Amino acid sequence: MFDFPSVAKLGHVAARKRDGDAVERVLSRQDFATSRAEITQWQGYQPTPLVSLTALAAKIGVGGILYKDEGPRFGLGSFKALGGSYAAQRLLQRQISARLGHEVSLEDIRTGTYRSEAAEITLVSATDGNHGRSLAWGCQRFGAPCRIYIHAEVSEGRAQAMRDLGAEVIRIAGDYDASVILAKQEAADNGWFVVSDTSWEGYSQPPRDVMAGYGVMTQEICDSLEQAPTHVFLQGGVGGLAAGVVAGLRQHWGTQAPRVVIVEPELAACLFESGRTGEATTFAIETETLMAGLSCGEPSGMAWEILSEEVSDFLTIPESLVAPSVRLLARPLPGDTAIEAGESAIAGLAALIAAREDADLSRKLGLTAEARVLLIGSEGVTDPAIFAQIMGESDAA
């Protein structure tokens, strides 16, 4: 059974690309090399699977679909394990070096040489779940206190996962962007340090470190391929994942790098609006999307520098595609590997399938029978209760 809506209206904006060198300037090759050298030394590191969905590709009429399954990443269920934890390690390295008056290495932080010093440095962030879990995990490993700010719609299961990693979790009544504001304010008032995956004026190093950490995932993909994909469909959010992946792909493949398509929920479409206006644009979120990790109303300025030069198309998808996409991966077509994915992981898959149902949109995106599409399965089952509900909806029907 192909459990997928036969008709779904996608929003589409063709990008107005700027000229520039952001893929080398914002995230340098050295940034990626440093993160790779360190993260591959972490206990439990191993590359995550790159799964070929051959039967699905044949079903929708493309040459291939590759799905990078980040569910197994360090036991945290998300690609974010590469970002928040690494940015925490880098921040502790910088702060302890400054306090002691001599250079401290990343290895020193990893092995706990300065654990007592780390215990005096509180790290904070706002999150929809996965970034906060990564930061909490890193703080637990490196010995630093951690405070995580979450908004009203973050599930209790995700909140408890962060508490289980030693974080103090503060839930607010507002949305994600309100939690970002509060985290910044309380950090400034108390001498704490924000480890965010989004940048703003005067704040850029931790978001750069977060995106550099994501480069480990991109390099794993490139190392396993002999030929570049023709397309990569990347979920939005603040843009950090997309920018990190795009920069890594461009640095590796050069002019042969894949066409970049950004996908967002129509309920949280800040990058789509930025693509439409040609500049970083805030989107007013009125209703929360089921894709909790993508519920972001304000783009990261640093990420937008890269995306404004590299993205070809912006798409939005309706909520009606989320649950069927999760179920399609978990109960795949015969011959394909079953994958248990979270709600935010399936944005690219949902958009790809729906786009192939629309001949005009397929033409605009350059999706042909020869297209080889890369998808980033950004999370596994990070909230079992939500996953069980989604899977049960089909059974009930």
Image: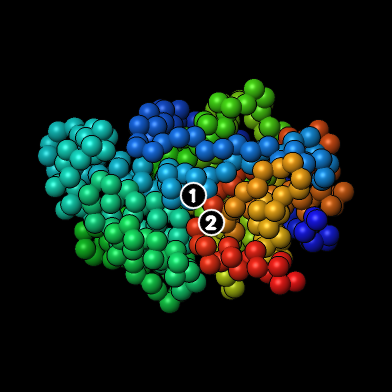
**266 or 133, which lies in front?**
133
Mark 2 to mark 1 CA distance (whole Å): 9 Å
Indicate the quadrant containing the N terminus: top left, top right, bottom left or bottom right. Answer: bottom right
Q: Which residue is mark 2?
A: 381
Tell me the residue at 76%/45% (across/down). Answer: 334
Does 13 appear above or below 90?
A: below
Question: For numbered disc 1, what is the local secondary structure?
Answer: loop
Q: Which residue is located at x 49 percent, y 45 percent?
A: 72
The reply to whether residue 275 is visible in this rendering is no
Neighbourhood count class around disc 1 (C-alpha, 10 Å): few under 14, some 14–19, many 20 upward: many
The amino acid at mark 2 is Val
Q: Residues within 10 Å of mark 2 (few under 14, many from 20)?
A: many
The image quadrant that residue 246 belongs to is top right
Q: Point out residue 248 in the picture as x, y percentages from the top left corner.
A: 53, 33
Disc ID at residue 355? none
Q: How many marks?
A: 2
Tell me where residue 296 appears, x and y as whole percent.
53, 61
Please, which residue is most extreme toward the bottom here? 173
Residue 78: image tag: 1
Is residue 170 at least partly visible in the picture?
Answer: yes
Q: Quadrant of the C terminus?
A: bottom right
